[in-house]
C-alpha cells in the first residue's frame, strides 16, 4: 500500500516519542558522569534514581530539538536540496 503524495512522513512529535527513551537514557548517563566529575570539587554524587529522574527531565527538550532537526533533514532530503543551500 502506498502513501498519498501529500503525506510527508512522521510528524515531529512522533519522531520525538520514538526517540525519547534513547534521549532520556543518554541524558541520565551524562547527568551521572557530570555528578561524578563534580564530586572532585566536593559536590555530591547522585544516586542512580536521581540521575534517571533528571535524565528524564533533561531528555525531553533535548529529544524534541533533535526530532525537529531530523524532521528538517527529512524535509530537505524529500525536496532534493542541499541543507547548506549550495
Image (tube, rainbow, N blue to C red):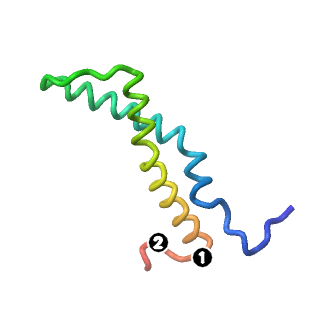
Image location (x, y in percent) of residue 4: 79, 71
- Residue 26 vs 32, above or below: the answer is below
Compared with 64, 8 (above or below) is below
Write the residue at 26% across / 21% down.
Answer: 45
Q: Which mark is residue 69?
A: none
Q: Are marks 1 and 2 in contact (CB under 8 Å)?
A: no
Residue 28, picture quadrant: top left
Mark number for residue 79? 1
Q: Residues within 10 Å of mark 2 (few under 14, many from 20)?
A: few
**61 vs 11: above or below:** above
Secondary-structure class at tag 2: loop
**Residue labelled with disc 2:** 83
Horizontal and vertical percent position of residue 35: 26, 28
Quadrant in which the C terminus appears: bottom left
Q: Residue 84 falls in which quadrant of the image?
A: bottom left
Relative to 28, 22 lies left or right: right
Amino acid at each position: 500500500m502506498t502513501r498519498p503524495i501529500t503525506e510527508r512522513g512522521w510528524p515531529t512529535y512522533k519522531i520525538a516519542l520514538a526517540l525519547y527513551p534513547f534521549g532520556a537514557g543518554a541524558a541520565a548517563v551524562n547527568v551521572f558522569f557530570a555528578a561524578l566529575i563534580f564530586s572532585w570539587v566536593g559536590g555530591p554524587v547522585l544516586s542512580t534514581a536521581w540521575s534517571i529522574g533528571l535524565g528524564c527531565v533533561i531528555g525531553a527538550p533535548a529529544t524534541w530539538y533533535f526530532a525537529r532537526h531530523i524532521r528538517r533533514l527529512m524535509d530537505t532530503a524529500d525536496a532534493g536540496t542541499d541543507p547548506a543551500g549550495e
